[in-house]
Amino acid sequence: MDLGLRGKKAIVTGATRGIGRAIVDLLAAEGVDVGLCARNEDEVNDTTAALKARGVNAVGACVNVRDGDGYKAWLEKTATDLGGCDIFVANVSAGGGMDSEKNWWKNFEIDVLHTVRGCEALMEHLKKSGQGSVVIISSTNAIETFAAPMAYNAMKAALITYSKQLSQFVGKFNVRVNSICPGPIYFEGGAWEMIKGTNQKFHDATLRAMPNGRFGTPDEVARVVAFLASPASSLVTGANVVADNGFTKGVRF
């Protein structure tokens, strides 16, 4: 299937490792020009060079999304450098943690505010696209009880509601908005590799909950994101797509 992505312009946050890196790699392979950010300058430079080697335009910068003004300035500059923005993938996350109240502020600022600010800053560009698409990365932690009550789970749930309501608000401008809930995803340097080393029992119990006995991979999530971002999914907006390898057990009609 031709996803119709070639020549599109995408901006992806947190795109040098894990799911974010898999997303920009796949988009570039599909012929998409990509703007990306992350916190590590060396990783940004390496990723940008790798994407350019695929023959697309790629621009990257070291950005702290908690700096609202700096983040919004980067978004506008990147859209200008790319010649527009057809796709925005909000991927950055603060991750889990429940050691203090600071986790709630951190997850609010990074997971929620970074997404809202990104959508607002890029919306005029997405409207001009005529086929604008926003994909928000949530988590299965948002839709079922998991581990413990923590800010990550609650803020990821907030993103699903925001995604649905935003889709209704901007649909008249031919901008689609969807969210995706990945289940446990294993990759080198990722959270589940760390959990395996620090809490083997929890890791193994989670693995046993997978019907086919394996974790998901960043590449598998990236393929779902690419479809949702593409004109091939023109009928899909306001959806929350669960990509969890059967990990969650709830029935959703």
Image (spheres, helix red, strand yellow):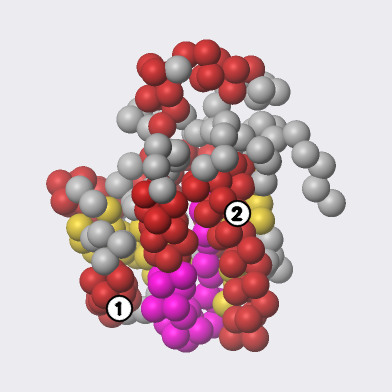
Q: Quadrant of residue 115?
A: bottom left
**Residue at the outermost right position:** 253
Q: Which residue is labeled 2 in the image?
A: 157
First in residue order: circle 1 vs circle 2: 1
Residue sitting at x 42%, y 82%: 125
Tell me if residue 177 comes above or below residue 247 in the rendering: below
Please say whether residue 176 is one of the residues in the magenta stretch.
no
Please state the horizontal and vertical placement of residue 224, each as a whole percent of the image.
57, 49
What range is drawn magenta here?
116-139
User: Mark 1 = which residue?
Assistant: 76
Residue at 61%, 42% in the rendered image:
140
Foreground of the two, 26 or 187: 187
Judge whether 100 appears above or below 239 on screen. above
Q: Is residue 47 left or right of residue 126?
A: left
Q: Residues within 10 Å of mark 2 (few under 14, many from 20)?
A: many
Task: Label 1, secondary structure: give it.
Answer: helix
Could you tell me if residue 109 is visible in this image?
A: yes
The Cα atoms of the two marked residues, 1 and 2, are separated by 27 Å
- The image quadrant where one finds the N terminus is bottom right
Query: Which mark is in front, 1 or 2?
Result: 2
Percent coordinates x, y for residue 253 in the rendering = 84, 51
Question: What residue appears at the point 52 percent right and 75 percent down from the top-left corner?
Answer: 132
Q: Residue at x 67, y 46 (%)?
A: 143
Q: How many marks?
A: 2
Magenta-span inclusion, residue 137:
yes
**Quarter of the image where one finds residue 232:** bottom right
| Residue 124 placement, left or right of 17 | right
Residue 121 position, x and y percent, is 39, 78
Q: Position of residue 27 (x, y in %)?
A: 42, 55
